[in-house]
Image: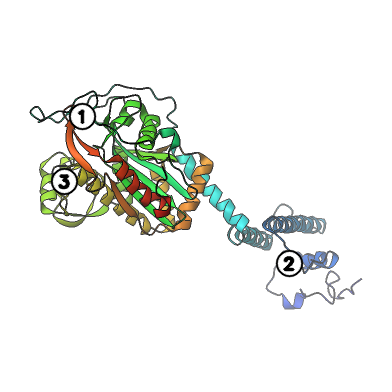
Amino acid sequence: MKKQNQNNPDVSEESTFDKGKTDKLSEEEFDYMQFIEELMAEEPIEKEIVINNDEEIFDNLNKSLGRQVLTEMEIQSKMDQKGGKKGKPSKMKYTLAGVGTLLFIFVFLFLTPLGRNFLWQTAANYAYGKMNYDDGLNVVAQEVVDDVEEDSTELPVKPTETPVQWDTNTTDESARIEEGITNILLLGEEAIDSGNGRGRTDIMMIATMNTIDKSFKLTSLMRDMLVQIPDNKDNKLNAAYEIGGIPLLYKTIELNFDVKLDGYVLVGFDDFENVINKLGGVKITLTDEEANYLNTTNYISKPEFRNVVGGSQVLNGNQALGYCRVRYVATGDDQINDFGRTSRQRIVLNAIFDQYKSKSMPELVLLMNDILPLITTDIKQDDFETYLRTAMSLGLTEIQNLRLPADHTFDEGYVRKMSVLIPDLQENVKILHEFIFGKKYISNK
């Protein structure tokens, strides 16, 4: 038993909290500190804790916080017994409890792999919950009208029955997939004049995350490519979605290009505008001819925005979407028609990517909260988290680009009065596989 101080029988001679040295403390704070000392003397804290894993870190921190709470309760009980002010905890009590809780949260969430994993899963689950999920399994087939050129009445037309003799052994059931490579189909749907039906996917790109060579790749699929559409007539690639939705588009791409797709992400053109506007616009360089064309046509749908100029500038969503859709004016590197359009689409997507890279983490969080509800996908929640982790691990500082059909691997022609690109399918499959899978993964068929 400690010898009590004669001037104050509640304070031992060995007490650190000597009343003479704590003149600035209130009586309640002095009593509180004294009782802490008494409890510590009764139940000494272990000085050495051996921690073997993350779960044990969490368990020890949890027990420590629990002991702190119980100690606080016991102190308050003793103070009440001594005639302290009931129902009015001291400021110091709040301070110590608050510091202990914050310390626990900080250590657990930021300094342990278990805590960081908890934060990551929470963020991924929140993001996934903001998107629209649609696996497309309940799709209803719909009739489509051929995309006939208005001035094609005098053009040569190939036979409707068998316009192309396809030279491929690929089937959609045997499409190629490789460990460490994820292929997500990015789609932009134009639903103008489609009523309540599906529109056509005028933007189609395969986004590839390759953990083998640590790269992120983007392959543009030109909408005017003539392809085999399972159980339907040969048609332009962008007709597959309009006919049979996502399931038929999957089968069409897998059949023609021998690549298994791991999911899709779709944004309507109206939402595409909103995505760009929420980013604050994208920086694009226009030629004088492109600027004049955009200002004098309805590609920029809102007349008040038909004020672009030649040179580098920031385009808003309506202007950028109009730029993406231009076909009949050459790009700065002399690409025209669907080649020019897909080139512009890649330019805009890369500009969006650059905008995201320039944002801070808090800004990105706020942006995602607004943008994710505009996205529709069939990716499962667990896969979504895995893909996010993969993207973060790759760093995503640069995008490699490819366009199909590649140069010198197609003919231009007309089928059923439709202007189409007729690809050398075997050559394009070879180029695509080398780009996505790497040289060692060139198709082995």
Q: What residue is drawn where x is 19% and y is 25%?
A: 159
Q: Quadrant of residue 242?
A: top left
Q: Position of residue 274 (x, y in %)?
A: 31, 43
Q: CA distance from mark 1 to mark 2?
A: 88 Å
Q: According to the image, label 1 marks what residue? A: 147
Query: Which circle, 3 or 2, is nearer the viewer?
Result: 3
Split into 4 quadrants, where in the image is the N terminus? bottom right
* Above-or-below relation of 138 to 314: above
Report the number of numbered marks.
3
Residue at 63% across, 58% down: 108
Q: In 3D space, how far apart are the residues under numbered discs 3 and 2 (Cα atoms)?
A: 85 Å
Identify the disc placed on residue 336: 3
Please state which amino acid type lies under the numbered disc 3. Answer: Ile
Tell me the mark number nearer the camera, choosing from 1 and 2.
Answer: 1
> Foreground: 305 or 339?
339
The C terminus is located in which quarter? top left
Instruction: Tell me the residue at 46%/43% (across/down).
Output: 177
Q: Earlier in the sequence, mark 1 or mark 2?
A: 2
Binning the other alpha carbons within 10 Å of mark 1 as few (below 14), some (14 to 19) or many (20 upward) gives some
- Asked if labels 2 and 3 touch by Cβ distance under 8 angstroms, the answer is no
Which element type, helix, strand or loop, lies under badge 1?
Answer: loop
Q: Is residue 274 visible?
A: no
Q: Look at label 2 and name its amino acid.
A: Glu
- Front residue of 397/110: it is 397
C-beta proximity under 8 Å, tags 1 and 3: no
Q: Position of residue 81 (x, y in %)?
A: 82, 56
The circle drawn on residue 27 is 2
Query: Amino acid type of disc 1?
Result: Asp
